[in-house]
Image (tube, grey):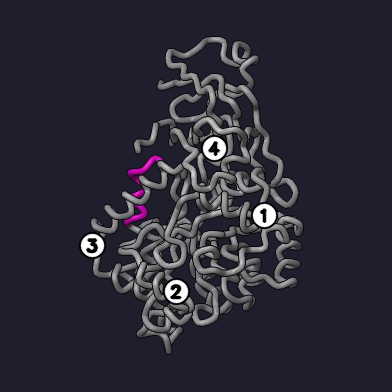
Amino acid sequence: MSTILFTHIRQLVNTREDSPLLKGAALANLPCIQEAFLLVEDGVIAEYGAMHDLELLVPQLPREVADAAGSMVLPAWCDSHTHLVFARSREEEFVCKLKGMSYAEIAAQGGGILHSAGVLNDYTEDTLFTLAWARLQELSALGTGAIEIKSGYGLTVDGELKMLRVIKRLKERSNLQIRATFLGAHAYPERYKDDHAAYLDLIIHEMLPIIGREKLADYIDVFCEEGFFSPEEMEIVCTAGMQYGLRPKLHVNQLNSIGGIRSGLRMNALSLDHLETLTENDIADLSFAAAQPGAPVCTLLPTAAFFLRMPYQPARALIDAGTAIALASDFNPGSSPSGNMNFVVSLSCIGMKLLPEEAINAATLNGAHAMGAGDLVGSITVGKKANLIFTRPVPSLAWLPYAFGTNCISRVMINGEWVSR
């Protein structure tokens, strides 16, 4: 049995006996222990507490004891919305945006999702895996210990299955907690742009049976947006996916409010993601749902709004409405080409005026709940995975989002093992 005891931790952050989904004002409650210890056994948090209780709680010291003086220790980030598997970057579209083209105009000219799909279908599974593995290693060194990864850049039977098989291989090789989401309904391929029913039929009758048989996905997603999938089409796809045990995690209200939230609530979605564009009625619907059992997590993606120069999500209004919010990176080659959750946390404070405590909770415990992993990761809790961020000496917790251009991380531990840089 491998055991390591960390002593003299300056501040142990997000210490909890249980792991509730944090709604409304509870998001600002971030329990911490000053001058703390943390015991890790076989990759799991075995005990923690104040240094003055060490002899009582750990009467027999293990062979390996590490002095963490000067470090804060946090649970690793839980990034619940990414598109990590893709073939190549799209910096040429970045230049087009700088010249004034909109996201919709770029998509209409064959860019965006359809461009990524065209390129991906020319790549082998092995090549995609190599590219995705390198990205995953980089993100883990930045403190991400749990991640959701979507398909959606295949848009063919072979392409979508290839992406999901890559994610399955990542799950098998990596120490990170990984969840796979089937996003075949990301966009309509060119050949189906005037025949939506035929593409829906392809998803339902050709993709989903294989995904279900091979257990390639944990969740199902649809990009519900004008020019993409309507709420009615989203419900058709999700209803079919739920027959294979795939609970919805949905793209809604990024550019327009077209009824996706109400559809998502009807289908008991685990999370409703993006939410840049919310009406008063949308917020009222989310507030009502938040008071019910099994309410969805509102996953906010501030780096996508930042990169697209859109208004940030109304985080404060959602908190005031009593909802549970999570933060995620939306890492993808078109609208958020970064999976750095440290920047996501900073940007949520700078752009959405979250308090540091709210941002950290949203990027750890609530992020874990938004991918169905709240019982495994997201807080310093006995029995959870030892997915940990050790900071450099910093003056305060608020320094982490405040010093947005500074690398505040000293070391990262995932499942009890150090991440190499």
The residue indicated by pointer 1 is 353
Amino acid type, callout 1: Lys
Amino acid type, callout 4: Pro
- In reply to whether residue 54 is colored magenta, the answer given is no
Q: Quadrant of residue 226?
A: bottom right
Amino acid type, callout 3: Thr
Q: Main secondary structure of the magenta part?
A: helix
**Residues under labels 2 and 1: Cα distance?**
26 Å
User: Residue, x 42% and y 62% (percent of image)?
Assistant: 332
Marks 3 and 4: which is nearer the front? 4
Please name whichever residue, 160 or 284, is drawn nearer the observer in this view of the structure. 284
The residue indicated by pointer 3 is 124
User: Residue, x 30% and y 67% (percent of image)?
Assistant: 120
Marks 1 and 4: which is nearer the front? 1
Q: Secondary structure at mark 4?
A: strand
State if disc 2 and disc 4 touch (CB < 8 Å): no
**Residues under labels 3 and 4: Cα distance?**
35 Å
Query: Which of marks 1 and 2 precedes in the sequence?
Result: 2
Query: Which of marks 3 and 1 precedes in the sequence?
Result: 3
Please name whichever residue, 317 or 69, is drawn nearer the observer in this view of the structure. 69
User: Residue, x 56% and y 49% (percent of image)?
Assistant: 345
**Residues under labels 2 and 3: Cα distance?**
30 Å
The residue indicated by pointer 4 is 75
Residues drawn in magenta: 166-176
